Image (cartoon, rainbow, N blue to C red):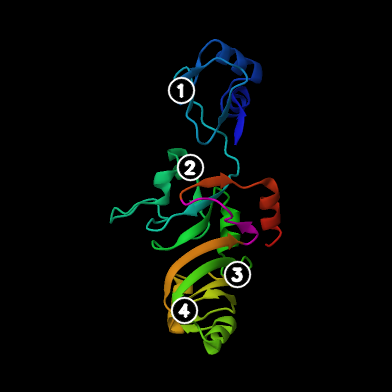
Amino acid sequence: MLERLQKILAKSTSLSRRAAEEAIKNGFVSVNGHVVTKLGTKADAIRDKITVSGKIARPVRYNIYIAFNKPRNTIVSKSDPEGRPTIWNRLSTEMKESLNSAGRLDFDSEGLILLTNDGDMINKITHPSGKVSKTYLVKTSGIPDESGLKALKEGIVLEDGKTQPAAVKIIRKTEKNATLEISIREGRNREVRRMFARIGCPVTKLRRISIGTIRLGSLKPGAWRYLAKQEIFNLRKLF
């Protein structure tokens, strides 16, 4: 979120707004290594490195909500002993240090991830009570028949127990595969993949397109955006 530089400094240092303006005009403030002297300059307190007389201006803690489109073949963990790429390689160090993901996606899955420093929000989204639905576009090898779709909708017995009922519909199909939309309220490990495997139609591609009221939309793989205030408000109404 872009804010006037003097406002950021007033919130993250001991400087008053007027003292911050003087520091800017006198060339004591840098943004990403470049000296700034124009008072109208805006910056992002999270993404940008802001210094005053060489000292980093640490932003005050406030809640941040980000929608990120996880690419395939990346992990959500902040580090990996196998050396696989993580989503955090595409984000700033500040974000990696201050944000966490509200749920995960497998290495070979893609789509919407919510990143935030709001621990309460993370708990509400990932809680086993399942108040927040997650919707996926799934491509399968083979086409689910009526009995398979019925099983998905009513719940399937997996190794770790029966799944909650899912909302599922076929979007399109060919002679050999199908694309379906499925919404679930749980977050078990590889749950959607295991559900389809159980009915004999293994998943070949999986993309999460929404979490509650938050939609992936046209966000490109590896890109991110801040959630709008109305989006956050609508999501909280689900809890």
**Image position of 231 (left or right of 88):** right
Q: CA distance from mark 2 to mark 1?
A: 19 Å
**Residue linked to disc 4:** 196
Residues at marks 1 and 3, CA–CA distance in whole angstroms? 45 Å
Residue 95: numbered disc: 2
> What span is colored magenta in the figure?
212-221
Please report contact status of discs 2 and 1: CB closer than 8 Å, yes or no: no
Provide residue 125's location: percent of width, then percent of height: 58, 61
Q: Amino acid at mark 3?
A: Gly
Mark 3 surroundings: few (<14), some (14-19) or many (≥20) residues within 10 A: some
In the image shown, does 220 or 99 lie closer to the viewer?
220
Callout 2: helix, strand or loop? Answer: helix
Between disc 4 and disc 1, the foreground one is 4
The answer to whether 119 is drawn above or below residue 150 in the figure is above
The numbered dot on residue 130 is 3
Residue at the (67%, 52%) spot, across then down: 231
Q: For the residue labelled by badge 3, is the local secondary structure a helix, a strand or a loop? A: loop
Residue 219 screen position, x and y as percent: 54, 51
